[in-house]
């Protein structure tokens, strides 16, 4: 019996990179979309690369337990304190320069110096900036750069300006002023990055309309989807809920809309229903709403516990751009959702299938009442929503998107199971050495496909 020479099998090897990740908010604890997404991206990157995080910590130095939570993931953490009052004064005194307010607020000389020192010391392969305000620091660095822009700020500010009532003269003027600066700033600053990512195609198309020469990629938002074991049956759920970082102006406004416009309409049909407000840093204006039927749960360790026990997530969203993380979280926990057309942007959900989409306060209250009254309707809506987020918005899917972006900048290397490369022995030695230096193989199921050029 003649023996056959085994056919060599080939795989692709990812390089272990030195990655610099810039953020302007400390990504722990997991309160607010800007912290949650950055945390999960960093967690994934640190599994396969050497990651250094440079970030601010608002209102003083970062407590050791916060830093430790990130260091336990294998991340090298450098944080600097940011005084919001001083940052606000800096915005006022520099109001006439070209930088938008949201960029100027985080423009800090000590952060710049820390960045320069890190770049000299570490010799990074690639730098990533989370939001434009972090990306501003990276613009002149001589290395490959990724801007994780999240949402198109011009689109966000334009919609927010339109949504702001004429009676709010001060707020409307600030948004007009910021939009004016962003129109000049945003399309220009993206030229300094190899790749710019957004969370929705709507944001990408808005950015393309301003600057079509950029390499845009989709890096959407994710959510933890392993809630099945903790799922609370719809028969046991009660009341309505809103969650979020409560000191954010848009969230504060939504809470007041629910309390003053939607809840009274619900009480005409269902007077026993309570409104649970859950999230971090509730301002005095929200704390004052507490009553027999309005309960404020501030700075809780895990908002998902409250979502799992609520029947309906009410979300009177208007304006803005990007994806609402709070909606994804509600869907993942089996909490039925009443939202608006802008509240569901970037999420391929349909009215009366995965969510209920309202166009005014009367509709929002009516849909909430129908869901509260009809357990079968809630079950149908919530099960389809849970299925959708599991298929489209798990962190595994977002991690694959991130890996694809890195692969585009640093293409994986071919390697043969026989120990030689696809060309000759010299190349084989290089590849073998790269493995010894902790370069990383792709999984056997995954074939590398470079992202299509848009």
Image (tube, rainbow, N blue to C red):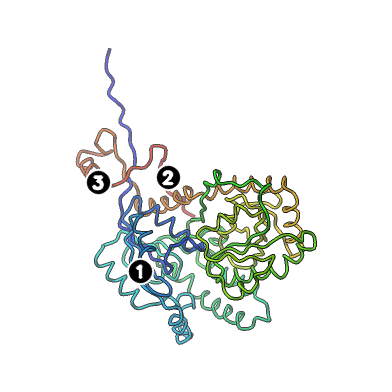
Could you tell which of marks 3 and 2 lies nearer the N-terminus?
A: 3
**Disc 3 designates what residue?**
434
User: Which residue has dot 1 on it?
Assistant: 79
Q: Which of 71 and 205 is in front in this view?
A: 71
Q: How far apart are marks 3 and 1 (CA)?
A: 32 Å
Horizontal and vertical percent for residue 117? 27, 70
Tell me the residue at 32%/53% (across/down). Answer: 49
Q: Choose the circle earlier in sequence order: 3 or 1.
A: 1
Observer able to see residue 391 = no
From the viewer's perspective, is residue 120 above or below residue 200? below
Name the residue beneath numbered marker 2: 449
Horizontal side, residue 127 vs residue 357: left or right = left
- Alpha-carbon span between mark 2 and mark 1: 36 Å
Left or right of residue 84, residue 350 in this image: right
180 to 396, vertically: above or below: below
Q: Number of numbered discs present?
A: 3
Describe the element under mark 3 as helix, strand or loop: helix
């Amino acid at each position: 019996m003649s023996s056959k020479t085994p056919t060599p099998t080939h795989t692709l090897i990812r390089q272990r990179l030195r990655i610099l990740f810039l953020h302007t908010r400390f990504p722990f604890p997991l309160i607010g979309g800007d912290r949650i997404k950055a945390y999960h991206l960093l967690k994934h990157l640190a599994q396969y690369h050497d990651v250094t995080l440079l970030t601010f910590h608002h209102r003083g130095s970062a407590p050791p337990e916060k830093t430790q939570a990130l260091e336990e993931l294998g991340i090298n953490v450098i944080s600097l304190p940011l005084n919001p009052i001083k940052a606000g004064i800096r915005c006022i005194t520099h109001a006439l320069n070209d930088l938008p307010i949201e960029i100027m607020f985080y423009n800090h000389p000590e952060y710049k110096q820390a960045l320069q020192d890190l770049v000299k010391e570490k010799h990074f392969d690639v730098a990533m900036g989370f939001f434009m305000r972090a990306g501003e620091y990276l613009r002149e660095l001589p290395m490959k750069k990724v801007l994780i822009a999240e949402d198109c700020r011009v689109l966000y500010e334009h919609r927010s300006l339109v949504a702001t009532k004429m009676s709010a003269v001060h707020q409307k003027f600030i948004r007009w002023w910021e939009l004016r600066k962003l129109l000049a700033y945003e399309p220009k600053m993206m030229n300094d990055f190899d790749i710019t990512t957004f969370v929705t195609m709507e944001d990408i198309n808005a950015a393309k309309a301003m600057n079509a020469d950029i390499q845009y990629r989709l890096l959407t938002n994710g959510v933890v989807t392993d809630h099945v074991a903790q799922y609370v049956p719809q028969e046991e759920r009660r009341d309505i809920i809103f969650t979020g970082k409560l000191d954010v102006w848009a969230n504060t406004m939504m809470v007041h809309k629910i309390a003053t416009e939607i809840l009274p309409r619900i009480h005409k049909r269902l007077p026993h229903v309570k409104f649970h407000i859950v999230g971090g840093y509730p301002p005095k204006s929200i704390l004052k709403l507490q009553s027999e039927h309005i309960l404020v749960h501030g700075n809780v360790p895990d908002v998902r516990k409250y979502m799992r026990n609520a029947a309906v997530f009410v979300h009177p969203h208007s304006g803005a751009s990007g994806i609402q993380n709070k909606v994804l979280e509600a869907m993942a926990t089996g909490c039925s959702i009443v939202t608006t057309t802008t509240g569901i942007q970037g999420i391929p959900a349909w009215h009366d299938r995965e969510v209920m989409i309202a166009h005014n306060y009367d509709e929002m209250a009516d849909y909430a009442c129908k869901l509260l009254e009809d357990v079968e309707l809630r079950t149908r809506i919530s099960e389809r929503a849970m299925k959708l987020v599991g298929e489209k918005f798990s962190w595994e899917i977002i991690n694959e998107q991130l890996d694809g972006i890195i692969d585009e900048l640093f293409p994986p290397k071919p390697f043969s199971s026989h120990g030689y490369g696809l060309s000759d022995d010299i190349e084989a030695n290089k590849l073998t050495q790269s493995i010894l230096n902790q370069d990383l193989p792709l999984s056997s199921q995954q074939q590398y496909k470079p992202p299509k050029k848009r």
